[in-house]
Image (spheres, rainbow, N blue to C red):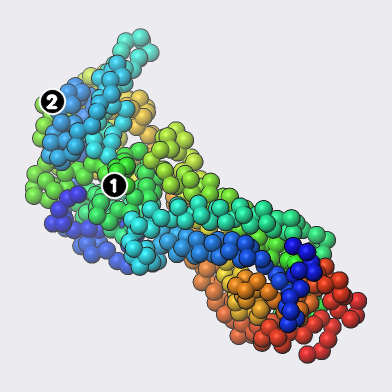
Amino acid sequence: MSQATLRVQKMSGHAGSVPGDDAQREFTVCKLIDTTTCIGCKACEVACMEWNDLPFGETVFDNTYQTMPETRWNYWNLILFNEHEKEDGSLMWLMRKNQCMHCAEPGCLAACPADGAIVQYTNGIVDFQQANCIGCGYCITGCPFDIPKMNPKTNRVFKCTLCADRVSEGLEPACIKSCPTGCLHFGSKEDMKDLAEKRAKQLRDDYNFPQAGVYDPAGVGGTGVVYVLHDATRPELYGGLPSNPSIPWSVKLWKGPLKWLGNVAMVGGLIGLFVHYLRFGPKSREDEDIHPRGENP
Amino acid sequence: MNHSDQILSHGRILRYEFHERLTHWIAAGSYIYLMLTGLAFYSPWCFWIAALLGGGQVSRMLHPWAGLIFTGAILKMFSMWSAQMYPTGADKAWWDSIGHYIRNEDDQMPAAGRYNAGQKLLFWGFIICGVLLLLSGAILWFPEYVPWNLRFLRYLAVLIHPSAALLTIGLFLIHIYMSVFAERGAFGSIIRGDVSLAFAKRYHPGWYEEITGQPASPKK
């Protein structure tokens, strides 16, 4: 979706090296979402729709604060709402802004077979290039966060770009700009991690949230979106945030050992058959030359 | 068809009737398209095949439909040939002598019927892999409609589909090698339908005896 001013360090379905690989100078960017100060106002949802010129779709009323059940191909940023009952019977409203996590090791990119349909820029943003997308939906299977969504009309997959076009021009993503409570921050991964840890410590020390912590899952190499959670031991409470996400085992097996086994078997099989022909030749020269069993040729 | 109708003039025997040949080539055509586009999705080194066949989008769009055509052909093959494909005691002896077969010492092979044990393996291999490819392919066709809590189906499908496809490629390579390069006369039989009496006697003596009522080998 976004601009080519960013250099690419990882590319899906690509044979050979990637132009921007090993050419990194810029730091990795990161979005920090402090769920403890999110009020669920949905300004970020609107800003995302506006900046990315996404076509409107119908919302669904489910008797809660939530606009619709999950993100859509044309709705990349959704506040997930959960009314959580604590052990003492009191209620907590948990709000989590859900969008692409921009994994350092993206499962979508690993699963994608189309050359350059999914790229990761040197600043860490994972971006879909719909022009190269073939509509197979493998990224949907590769993603541990259920983020890529197919446009059923065009069979191309969409998701949050972390406003790569804005970031490449030195601007912060649209959602960050719109947040009225300051629960969203944008900067280098290092700075955001630092800020997140400070906030989590504050929550533990001063606000009676002893389980408060930072969500930056190592299973996908860390993410370009980190959360501060009141209870980092139970991320599932926050709209099903997986506690230990990783690229699905079957995708790893399929793109790793199975592929090499298959390659060796196919090439080995072809060579084997050719060598067999060189060694033993055909069973007979011509149809008519075939001699019946038990008779000498 | 009566056995006597299968004996043609000029020392030929009818091996495949028209509907058998047509089914074979519908399966072959759809399979080759599926294999080529499948290889394009399988490895970046083969993605150029998709470009050659009209682009990745077109290949992804047509691959499942070709799969349905292939499924239809496989079902027809099952109804035509499965009765002749059940393993017999002779097949065990055939596998025990596989070394002779590989070294083209066909004189020393146990007598095969219309299909030898290797051909039966090819048949059942394609039937079983065909079913696996159909089931996993249905999931891969519409991954976006598989609910999140049933995502293990997608995880299984992305493993089963290429695994079964790779097995069929192995069978396919051997099938092409045997029919086009190794056994002269076999390719003609799936084009024009007939083989020579000598071909039948040598490679399928049991079938020869069934059709002609004559012993295939003077030693017998």
Q: As drawn, is A220 to the left or to the right of A97? A: right
The answer to whether residue B36 shows anywhere in this view is yes
Left or right of A120 in this view: A108: right
- Specify the amino acid type for callout 2: Thr
Q: Residue at x 38, y 13 (%)?
A: A87
Separation of residues labelled 2 and 1 (CA atoms): 37 Å
Kind of element beneath mark 1: loop
Chain letter of mark 2 equals A
Q: Label 2's element?
A: loop
Snapshot quadrant of residue B199: bottom right
As drawn, the label of residue B120 is: none
Query: Which quadrant does the N terminus of chain B fall into?
Result: bottom right
The residue sitting at 22% across, 62% down in the picture is A20
The residue lying at 51 percent from left, 71 percent from top is: A267
Q: Amino acid at mark 1?
A: Thr
- Residue wearing tag 2: A181
In which image quadrant can residue B58 be found?
Answer: bottom left
Give the residue displayed 59% in from the left and 61% down from the top: B23
Image vertical order of residue B6 relative to residue A189, above or below: below
Q: Which residue is mark 1?
A: A154
Residue B37, image x, y percentages: 42, 61
- First-in-chain label (2 vs 1): 1
Location of the C terminus of chain B by quadrant is bottom right
Residues beneath discs 2 and 1 located on the same chain: yes
Q: Nearer the viewer, residue B203 or A270?
A: B203
- Can residue B178 be seen at all in this image of the molecule? no
Q: Are marks 2 and 1 in contact (CB under 8 Å)?
A: no
